[in-house]
Amino acid sequence: MPLTLNLATPEDVERAFYDALSHGDADLLMPLWCEDEETVCVHPTGVRLSGTSPIRESWQAIFASARLRVEPELVGHWQGSIMAVHHLTEILFVGDDPSPHGPLYVTHVYMRGPHGWRLVCRHASAADDGQHAMDEAIPHTLH
């Protein structure tokens, strides 16, 4: 995928992103990211990476360790003229293990530039239905 690839919509970027993940190929993945040191990727482990070099290195390490299959589902989205935000859930399958991992909550932020849309932020975290947090917030002693 050449760096001058023109991605006409955020959905084009998202499809190409998950295609690159399914191929385990950082060379396909990285042209989808905005080339800016402020570009951010937060993996489900909580590691926050800024800039394309650390992001590339992290994906190369992930792809070297296991083959991934990701089933994304778009939950909601917003799009303006130069920025778009997609909220998704992902179910992750690692290697030949048929057991799903996740779900993950994922937020993708896209910006439109001179060469089309690019990913500027990906934040993935383990999904929590909030029940545990609610249980902790409710007082256990009634007066």
Image (cartoon, helix red, strand yellow):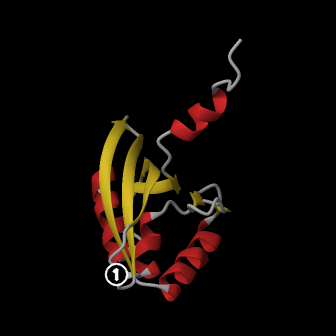
What residue do we see at 59% from left, 33% from top? 135
Is 5 left, or right, of 120 in this rendering? left
Disc 1 marks a residue whose amino acid type is His
Q: Which residue is under mark 1? A: 23
Which corner quadrant holds the N terminus?
bottom left
Q: Identify the image quadrant of residue 90.
A: bottom left
Which corner quadrant holds the C terminus?
top right
Q: Where is residue 82 in the image (x, y as percent from the top left)?
A: 41, 40
Is 9 left, or right, of 67 in this rendering? left
Q: Where is residue 36 in the image (x, y as percent from the top left)?
A: 59, 59
Residue 99 to residue 96: above or below: above
The extreme top residue here reads 143
Q: Identify the image quadrant of residue 79.
A: top left
Residue 6 to residue 83: above or below: below
What residue do we see at 34% from left, 39% from top? 77
What residue do we see at 68% from left, 16% from top? 142
Residue 50 appears in view = yes
Q: Position of residue 19 (x, y in %)?
A: 30, 72
Residue 9 appears in view = no
Q: What element carries label 1?
A: helix
